[in-house]
Amino acid sequence: MRQIVRLLIVTDDQSETAHGGFLCWVDQDPADAGGDFSRDFHLGEFVRCLSDTSWVGFDLRIVKAHRSPAGHEGFTEAQIKADRGADVIGFRFDQPFTIDRREFTLSDFDVVMFFSLAFNDPDPALAPEAEAIARFMEDGGGFFGTGDHFFLGAPLLGLVPRVRSMRRWWSVTGPNGEPAAPPPFGSTRIDTTRAGADGVTNFEDQSDDVPQEIKPKLYPSGYFFGRIRMLPHPLLCSPDGRITVLPDHMHEGLCEVPDNLAARTFIANAPFFKNADYIFRHYMAWLNLVWVLPLLSWWHMIRRAKVSAA
């Protein structure tokens, strides 16, 4: 029997005209594509890709949760579920929820992903939810959290241990010295948009087929036919080679290398911006590239040689 990996994907709304959801943009009525109910911020293509992939050694079971409650913007529970493509609405990380008469909590999942559109600085009122996420991670659960430019996603994600130290979330310098995120507009924004086929940079070019190019940092990874083999971080390795492009965008956020690596921030009440986990992640990636992959390659070559000799 194949192992089941249980994935919970969570999103929210930004405003009355910017809704997060799980439906595909290309499936909507063309009349709605530019209106108040546009699926510009939906995750439908991402969910479809996860669902359609033939995973090796396991199957993926996905639950889609939305944070808007029944009555939001005058819609019923059924209407919000249909409009956002969600399995459950009114979701809170520190509260159980029900699907088809079965009750779930975070502990029922292996991985949780939160794609947040809510904008504002980190909100202390959401600390109980951040603590629930911290306990989930402490118990071995995997958590991924992201927003968009400036402080999108910050009200909750800016409180979550480790997540709050790996990205700039604040609109201004935070109360504990947290650095401000880059602005969404103006000359100091981080713009990676590449010009389209017409050679002119437009807002729509971030949706075309011309991505931004990246230059991954390379690490020595043993010898290959007498030459030092150089590879990027495992996240940027693929069966087709190095990943050297990413989607372009007109106002990027900014990831952060913590300035103090002497302690962990895994628990919710730890001091901000002290994250030894960065060293661990960096070291383990280096270890895998320098030792594990070369040793496996060496073992494979020896094994093939023995088989050939036999």
Image: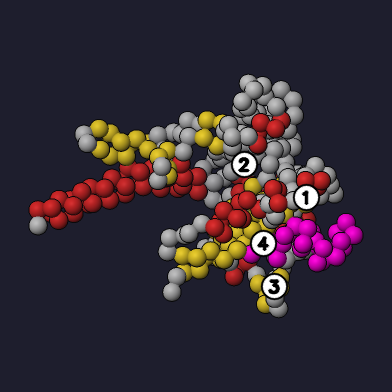
Residue range in magenta is 63-87
Give percent across and percent down for residue 75. 87, 61
The tag on residue 167 is 2
Whole-angstrom CA distance, mark 3 to mark 4, is 11 Å
Looking at the image, is 125 positioned above or below residue 235?
below
**Which residue position holds label 3?**
99
Residue 49 visible in the picture = yes
Q: Nearer the viewer, mark 3 or mark 2?
A: 3
In the rendered image, the residue lying farthest to the top is 199
Amino acid at pointer 4 = Lys
Looking at the image, is 87 positioned above or below residue 194?
below
Identity of the residue drawn at 80% across and 61% down? 80
**Which residue position holds label 4?**
64
Asked if residue 51 lies in the magenta stretch, the reply is no
Colour scheme of the rendered structure: secondary structure
Is 225 or 253 nearer to us in this picture? 225
Give percent across and percent down for residue 178. 67, 39
In the rendered image, the residue lying farthest to the bottom is 101
**Which residue position holds label 1?**
29
